[in-house]
Amino acid sequence: MGSPHGSDFPAALIRFATCLGIQIQVCDPHHPQQNGFVERYNRTYQQECLALDRPATLEQAREVTETFGMHYNTQRPHQGLSCGNRPPRTAFPALPALPAVPQTIDPDRWLQDLDGLHLERKVDRNGTVSIDLKRYYISAQLKGHRVVLRLDAQSRSMQVIEEQKAIKSLVLKGLMNQTLSFEQFLVHMQRQARAQERLRSMQERKYRTGKFATP
């Protein structure tokens, strides 16, 4: 779920949920007790499904997961206090209906939750700064100076502030600036997630190589 090192904006999964009006609460690193219900389910799923059926392909994994989900919800006693040693669908036969998926989505809606975000950067020798792993030109005359960048969600830009004075506006890169159908939005976010995963994996490989190469 995490963003690559150096990112300033949320990971693709969080942005995907935010655009659909879903709030995700991210647990602190190495604190599984903050999300004990999900962690317990993951262990059960691993021990009682994957470790037993050992699916060899994605299709097999989907099939055994669907079968396990039916067993978990309708047959397997649940020891949670709210279930009282009954299967979840027995304890809760009527569940609230989920809202329908919207037909069109603003893929840049996640910016609204970050409106007013402040970042501090040092202008490099080329007069540029990095924002979410992308380079932006500020001014060669400000080389070595520190500036504050303030996110303006409405204009979809970063306001550059130097010595408490706004000196420039930077239009954010990588935004869609148009509404998409849900299918288009899903494809777009899948591409974003894959790109982030590739970059994160590359960063981890470089870290491990550098770590093990150090005498």
Image (spheres, helix red, strand yellow):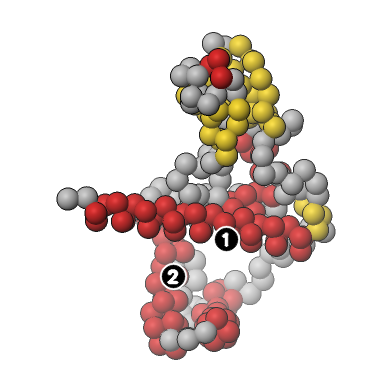
Quickly name the residue at label 2: 42
Q: Residue at x 63, y 74 (%)?
A: 93
Q: How far apart are labels 1 and 2 at the CA level?
A: 23 Å
Splitting the image into 4 quarters, where does residue 128 fall?
Answer: top right
Q: Name the secondary structure under disc 1.
A: helix
Q: Which mark is residue 70?
A: none
Pick whichever, 126 or 45, lies toward us: 126
- Dots 1 and 2: beta carbons under 8 Å? no
**Amino acid type at image mark 1:** Arg
Give the image location of residue 193, x and y in percent.
58, 58
Give the image location of residue 96, x and y in percent.
69, 64
Residue 120 in the image: above or below residue 198: above
Quickly name the residue at label 1: 194
Residue 7 in the image: above or below residue 58: above
Splitting the image into 4 quarters, where does residue 16 fall?
Answer: bottom right
Toward the bottom, the furthest residue is 53
Q: Which is more N-terminal, label 2 or label 1?
A: 2
